[in-house]
Amino acid sequence: MASGSLIAPNKTRDVLDHTRFTDSTKALRGLPPSYVPGLHLDPLADSQLPNNGTLMWNKNVEESNVSQFTCSSVNTPDENGDGAEKPVSSAKFRYIKFARFVIASVFIAVAIVVMAAVTIMYQKAPGPGSKAEDYSKEFQCFLSSDNTTTTHWKLRFNTAIVISCNYSENIGQIISNSSLLLEFNPNIYRLQAHHSPEINQTLQSEMISTGRWIIRSSPNIEIRGAPVNCGDEGQLVITLQTPTRSYKHQVDVQIESELSSVRMEVGQSAVDEQFEIRCSSTSGCTPASINLIGTLGNTTFPLYGMNFTCITTYNGDDGWSVGCTGSIPESVVSSIDEITCRPVLQNQTEADEAEVKISKEVLVCNDSLNCSFDCSGDNQDKYYSNPKFCNIFHRCVDERLYTAPCGKGAYFSTQTCVCSNIDDVIKEIGCDKDGMRLNVENVKTLCTYSTGS
């Protein structure tokens, strides 16, 4: 069969890719046939199969196809298998060129920014051998240690704030021509952008009074304010403006929340067989409630169901105060060893130091001679010492006997009828170091002239 003629399908051609056939229609129209690189190596192409089905190479066809292939057009088969001449578009090359231009521009811009930043840093940096001036030592302010705690350097609640500012000899020569500004930024208003100064005074006089502050300018600057409360926590920004330059220093003001020892008193009544209990304490700027706890042996447990209620209040003198009241049946008191009022604190060591206890032995007595206290009308608001324990005293109020312990480090004195230092009471030969009464013959003493501790 002549080259380029059609042959009947056979088993081999059933699996041929129809895109490998030369488009004879285009050849008749004068168009170049599709050129597929490597087609002459395909043993199954029609143009390469002779009549007997053996592989042959047609030099004329190959040379014709090669001569008709150009770089500007490529004939690729379409979805229907027909070859189609698709010229390569120049839009793609324009896109690539534009992308290269954009990337190059970005790199150049980044390089310019980096060079500018390095130049600025170099200009600001001190030259070789030069040293930046430090004015921090010429003017320094700090809180006076008289009214601060030794552990945290905080102001004690309700004590006067005193700030001392030291200045250099050079500043001292021009201090009378200088001005002092003080701005207070309280913590509770920290989000506020600007605060007007509380002090804006020239230091022509050695003593100046303005608002809540008194200023003394020689031999150093002392700024004394009113007693602080919880709203005075914040930052004091102090600025000294001299004729040559200004100096600024900041002082942080923090208030120490010192918890007082819990005070307890238990009222005894033979009528209703109830013990009325009262516990109270102050805690500065941190409110702290009180729990009622019972002890039996080595076990401690909350005393629930005693109608124990606490009310927390705040005032400028004491800060936060808590007062708790409740009633305990005599049957409960008789079944435990101790009653404890314990503050609710995260620091358990502070809670241990502030808690107060009273034993069942003090409240429930079987000895009528030692435990009978006369709270008739003549003995109202008077005090008894306890016949056995030095840290316990008794008080008659509204014909009812109240029992209370002294604070830590104190015993009840039978001479002064108040809670006094332990060493002072021991010197009275009234108690031993273990807190037991020595004068057992005089089992109880009624103070007739004092209103107590």
Image (tube, grey):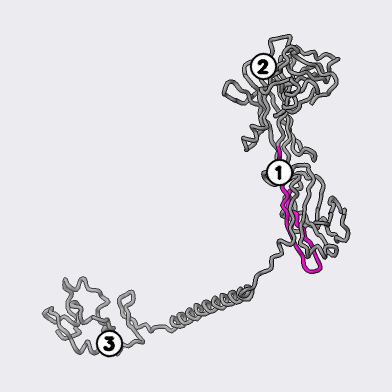
* Disc 1 target residue: 149
- Tell me the kind of residue under disc 2: Glu
Tag shown at residue 233: none
Magenta highlight range: 233-258
- Tell me the kind of residue under disc 1: Thr
* Disc 2 target residue: 361
Determine whether the residue tagged by mark 1 lies in a helix, strand or loop. loop
Residue 411 on image: x %, y %: 73, 24
* Disc 3 target residue: 27
Foreground of the two, 314 or 260: 260
Asked if residue 271 can be seen in this view, the reply is no
Asked if residue 350 can be seen in this view, the reply is yes
Q: CA distance from mark 2 to mark 3?
A: 126 Å
Residue 346 on image: x %, y %: 62, 38
Q: CA distance from mark 3 to mark 1?
A: 107 Å
- Tell me the kind of residue under disc 3: Ala
